[in-house]
Amino acid sequence: MKNRLREILLCSAIIVVIALIVCVVKFHNGYDARKNMQEASTKTLVEAVAGVPNYENTESFTFAQTLPPTLAPTNAPTDAPTVMPTQPPTDAPTQVPTQPPISNEIPSYVYSLSSTLKTCGYQIDKVKRDQYNRPDVLESVHAAYGDKYNAVFIGPEEKVIYLTFTMGYEYVDENGVPNTDKILAILEEKGIKATFFVDWGYIYLQKAMCKKIVESGNALGAHSYRHPPEGVASWPVADQVNDAKKIKKALYDATGVVPTLYRPDSGIWSEQSLAIIKEMGFKSILYSYSYNDFLVDNQPDPAVALQGLKDNLHYGEILYLHSISTTNVKILPEFIDYAHSQGYTFKLFE
């Protein structure tokens, strides 16, 4: 009788254990399934909102052997220029891009470099300057990283200004006129060129404007693909490489021109990120003067902003402006005239 009772208890215990094991396995599989579904749904939602095409398989991407013919701008600048440009627009490229196809290979030395994040900003009222009004801190940073990683933090000690605009989206006035059209008209009127840095969001929404920028003889550069608030430079190496490949392909697809200039998103960079961008075939373009011009609903007073530009004028200046700023549109013609009166010329990056 006792043996029979033991057998019954033992069988019951075995059944309970088996049932527990089955429950654990089902729960784990269910958790994995829910997790995978959640991740897939999140990715689908993000890509649907951003309008992101399938640029995941960029390893096999190669550039076309010939560039497509130049396309005529879809819209003429709203404000017709009153003075003819002093120099003709740059001709569209007719040769095969000299840059090799995008590579997924990153040299091993990159992984040993510092990933400590840095920014380009400095306190205007405290920074030391040389006899040409150049910020000493930027001269030091450029000396340390510029030539080594094909990066430019400040230009040469010459009366030269590199005018740049960064663009994540377009600002359109109450009459439906985009700010970038106004800026392009001003540049044409004054006979100068500028560099425009765009991220994927801008390319997706403003492909025609990207073409217009290139066709007008101005330069178009990359400003990262995703533009996360923490900066692409904070990501793992593989993710930084993938982001650079995506923005390069997106710009090429939009304009037919291989981009060679890159501005780190939010001005955030590290020694490692500079090396990555160099290995991806870009020249990193930082900046030596900027101001808070990017809040559309809280634009700086034009007179104050213009005076700031004049006071901070310096040899080799890389001027960082945002195209969404209505203040910049208002003061740009006068600033260009003032810079010219001081003997400065405006150039594009080589």
Image (cartoon, rainbow, N blue to C red):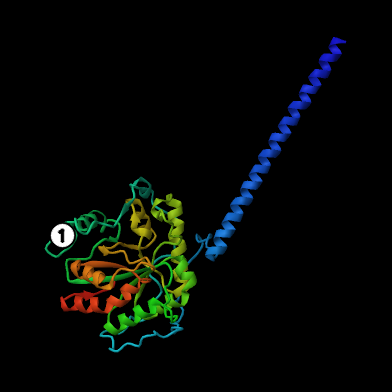
The answer to which quarter of the image holds residue 54 is bottom right
The answer to which quarter of the image holds residue 185 is bottom left
* Quadrant where the image shows the C terminus: bottom left
Q: Nearer the viewer, residue 253 or 295?
A: 295
Look at the numbered disc 1 and give the secondary structure of its residue: loop
For image coordinates 72% across by 30% down, the residue present is 20
State whether residue 350 appears in this view.
no
* Quadrant where the image shows the N terminus: top right
Left or right: 292 as drawn, with respect to 177: left
Left or right: 257 as drawn, with respect to 189: right
For image coordinates 36% across by 54% down, the residue present is 273
The image shows residue 60, relative to residue 325, as above or below, that is above
Q: Amino acid at mark 1?
A: Arg
The image shows residue 18, relative to residue 76, as above or below, that is above
- Tell me residue 57's x, y (percent): 53, 60
Few, some or many residues within 10 Å of mark 1 (<14, 14–19, 20+)? some
Q: Nearer the viewer, residue 298 or 4?
A: 298
Residue named by callout 1: 129
Q: Nearer the viewer, residue 332 or 234?
A: 332
For image coordinates 44% across by 64% down, the residue present is 247
The image shows residue 199, relative to residue 194, as above or below, that is above
For image coordinates 69% across by 36% down, the residue present is 25
Q: Residue furthest right?
A: 1
- Tell me residue 167's x, y (percent): 39, 68
- Tell me residue 78's x, y (percent): 39, 85
- Tell me residue 182's x, y (percent): 36, 80
Left or right: 350 as drawn, with respect to 12: left
Q: Residue furthest top?
A: 2
The image shows residue 76, relative to residue 5, as above or below, that is below
State whether residue 151 appears in this view.
yes
